[in-house]
Amino acid sequence: MAVAELAIEGALLIGSDIRRGTAGEIRATEARTGTKLSPGFGGATAADLEQACALAEAAFDTFRNAPLETRARFLETVAEEILAIGDILVERAMAETGLPRGRIEGERGRTVGQLRLFAGVVRDGGFLDVRIDPALPDRKPLPRPDLRLINQPLGPVAVFGASNFPLAFSVAGGDTASAFAAGCPVIVKAHSAHPGTSELVGRAVQRAVAACGLPEGTFSLLFDSSRTIGQALVADHRIKAVGFTGSRGGGTSLMAISAARAEPIPVYAEMSSINPVVLLPSALASRGAAIGKAFVGSLTLGAGQFCTNPGLVLAIDGPGLDSFIAAASEALAACEAQTMLTPGILSAYCAGVEALAGHAAVKTVGKGKAGEALTGGAQLFETTAEAFLADHALQAEVFGAASLVVRCPDEAALHAVLAALEGQLTGAIHLDDADTEIAARLMPLMERKVGRVLMNGFGTGVEVCHAMVHGGPFPSTADGRSTSVGSLAIARFLRPVSYQDVPQKLLPEALRDGNPLRLPRRIDGRLTLPEA
Amino acid sequence: MAVAELAIEGALLIGSDIRRGTAGEIRATEARTGTKLSPGFGGATAADLEQACALAEAAFDTFRNAPLETRARFLETVAEEILAIGDILVERAMAETGLPRGRIEGERGRTVGQLRLFAGVVRDGGFLDVRIDPALPDRKPLPRPDLRLINQPLGPVAVFGASNFPLAFSVAGGDTASAFAAGCPVIVKAHSAHPGTSELVGRAVQRAVAACGLPEGTFSLLFDSSRTIGQALVADHRIKAVGFTGSRGGGTSLMAISAARAEPIPVYAEMSSINPVVLLPSALASRGAAIGKAFVGSLTLGAGQFCTNPGLVLAIDGPGLDSFIAAASEALAACEAQTMLTPGILSAYCAGVEALAGHAAVKTVGKGKAGEALTGGAQLFETTAEAFLADHALQAEVFGAASLVVRCPDEAALHAVLAALEGQLTGAIHLDDADTEIAARLMPLMERKVGRVLMNGFGTGVEVCHAMVHGGPFPSTADGRSTSVGSLAIARFLRPVSYQDVPQKLLPEALRDGNPLRLPRRIDGRLTLPEA
């Protein structure tokens, strides 16, 4: 760890500057032991924030108007710089989060893969949605002007690192990568649960900015010893969108700050989801026990600290469901308690579990092994559809490896429970062929409640690809029209701008005659591809 | 008018029902005379609203899952039914708005054209953004599941008719057409300035719903004698998006209602814009007078009652600007005062004009002819960049034919004034070849402030096409990521949904193997077109 500590100074990254913040200090904690790690991280002052915002604003036009190839190379350079940090990064992230090496290495691969995916998206250029309606000078009664449309980036974006993905949804994670891909400078407010990891990755981004000859304000990284700086960042008039992954309370407070601005801005907060899993009768009858075992694998993955953790199981009562619960309970009993990301997350988890365990209509039906301090043991509960429908509190997310099975007397009750749910990131249906009709009746409800419908699987394991939606109706996200994972995440940071009768030399290159950037374009409404 | 009055009952349209509301009454007014027209329109009660929402909710799944061809035919049938109303509609709209026959007939053509445009968009299917990432069962370390994505409609949409477009942005206007095209049922809250026009068009939509065999809740039309019903409509949990065109106060109040909901929803409010027109030196020097004359044509069109009315002119001081003002003033002096849409709009216009005329730093430099009661005369004012920058109130929209010229001492002042503006729908630049460099320096600022940049023209005359953006940063619209005119308006009512490992027969048809609907698709990230 000596090298790691050498490389980490506890410094803010304001454009190309590396300097210590003076507004208090945050300390990293070794998740497994609770030991404070060195060095401390100086918190940003209002002046630091002001400078980061001014630099981002100053960088915006240059960054957005740089060639797409430069933007793509920048994303790839960030990926290369992250890999170049080497094992120091893995060890520091493991220490700060308590997550095992395999998970952190996998997450690093995902982070790098995301950056490269967005490089490809930038080169493809389809995200620009180029549309050209050529002039019709002879049209009667009035001529039609020349109209061309392109998506432009919104402006500087504030990104809040997530505690549960120290790499893939933090400093250079999905929000940052998609904002960069859109052409937006980024100011990251680091999560205080992994500040060392944040600084290491932040420096990698900072080096990539310099290596690619981009303006320094393209990226800044702030630590915040209170909540003041994060809130002021969202309120700053130069910030034009916000990416956040975290709690419902945190996300809705950012939404409120945005709504109170002179110019409200989009807030993409990924917040709260219990990800219903529906077990259909024939599947339960034929393989309830196998599903129960697989379910526990998903439930306990990463100590349950995933937004897509299966926190709710719905099924029609019967022996199939009994065998599911029995198998899940047996699998759970063998599960070791796992270190949780932070003491705060652990105590929230314990409070959630206690509330369920003490609820008059809820029965504890499975438990993982009890562990040492700072670990959370998995828990399985059950209740009835009637009780669930009677108490809205039963659908509150318990972040961690806890889940609630709702026994439904019949299909109508199952529909009623699903209909009573708030918006969700994912919804899973386990089915056999014989369940097709009941599944077909569930689909319309499922499609309206969630961002991703999946069959015979669990929502954990979010593929980073083009057809992924990691989003969903409120409160799973603040804006259900968006995804924070996958290539479509770039759309969050774009707005269309139309150009009417603008001379060629004043048009963005992507809109010029002859299609110099070889982009897919919609001409007079008809989609055309560049020749291969 | 006898036939028109026969056809109008003052009735609510709740699904397939036609019945009189009992919560108070609104009366149409003949705009030119102030005379109350018959019949009165009964206001909707809370029970009427409840029924409209319940019907819309019940219709949603059926409507969205009907074949795309049915949806396209429905849009075309609405267009046919509107044309079939015949001259009754034109006469009633003329009476209620004071707009001349040519304008109303043109607007009917635009309304019908919009509906047909969206029928084409529905058939094209590109709006679905179909994405397929096929399974990779052999991938290491983990297989990739089959992932498919499609845009799904948000749900029932509330549309508020606009006073200034009694056809094109009212009952079957752009918001309604694009929501239908997306697959959303619509509940319209009619604007009380043209209730008879609203009922006539509403009945045309109601007939089209029946003719196309769609569920009755696909469309309802409500009159509101207070503001209660409109507000309750936006607050209703079954409503999933709002389309509105009107005042800043009205739009921001709907935004606040949405933000206070248990589930906040997108509000697309098109509100307030003064549409800066920048006159560059060489263009002014060579043809300042001609631009001044053309400017007055745009300023006084439709009594200035357009969202894209040129309310602000920016130029560097000099003889070219003097000749612009002189020519504009001369052209204005010949302009007849025009009837305004409503007494409320007229009195707001008069108050805005009085505030400018009485402002210490503002000089009146041109006036149209004074007219009779209920008409508004055009007004041209000027001020200095310094005064404009010192008083934010000078950028408030005056809805009507009033405009303010800001004399800038130099290019830096012109930039400063533009930078100080709030978000706008349009920004125009008048330039000659010799102005190219100064225009190039203006473009980045313009692109960030507006939804549509146009050259050597004025923003009035909004082409309904694929490359149009009628939107822009707040407060020109509530959501600057959207357009309310043109085919891209459909995107406002969609959200992506991902399907993972879903069997063929449970997938939406658009996502099935073999591309049965012959849609453009993104396969593994690569855009492919169906064979011709």
Image (cartoon, coloured by chain):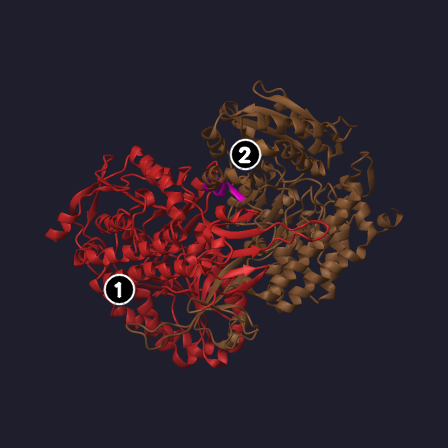
Chain colours: A brown, B red
Q: Residue at (24%, 70%) from the top-left corner?
A: B334
Asked if residue A485 is among those painted magenta in the image, a careful observer would answer: no
**Residue A76 at x, y percent in the picture:** 70, 62
**Residue A423 at x, y percent in the picture:** 52, 39
> In the image, is A176 to the left or to the right of B327?
right
Q: Secondary structure at mark 1?
A: helix
Name the one closer to the observer, B96 or A248.
A248
Q: Amino acid at mark 2?
A: Ser
Q: Which residue is mark 2?
A: A282
Name the one closer to the observer, B463 or B380.
B463
Quadrant for residue A296, please give it.
Answer: top right
**Residue A23 at x, y percent in the picture:** 73, 43
Q: Are marks 2 and 1 on the same chain?
A: no
> In the image, is A85 to the left or to the right of A463?
right
**Residue B360 at x, y percent in the picture:** 40, 58
Asked if residue A449 is among those painted magenta in the image, a careful observer would answer: yes
Label 1 near label 2: C-beta < 8 Å? no
Magenta part mainly helix, strand or loop? helix
Whether residue B454 is situated above or below residue A229 in the rendered picture: below
Q: Which residue is mark 1?
A: B106
* Label 1 crowd bin: few (<14), some (14–19), many (20+), radius 10 Å: some
- Residue B485 visible in the picture: no
Name the one closer to the observer, B420 or A106.
A106
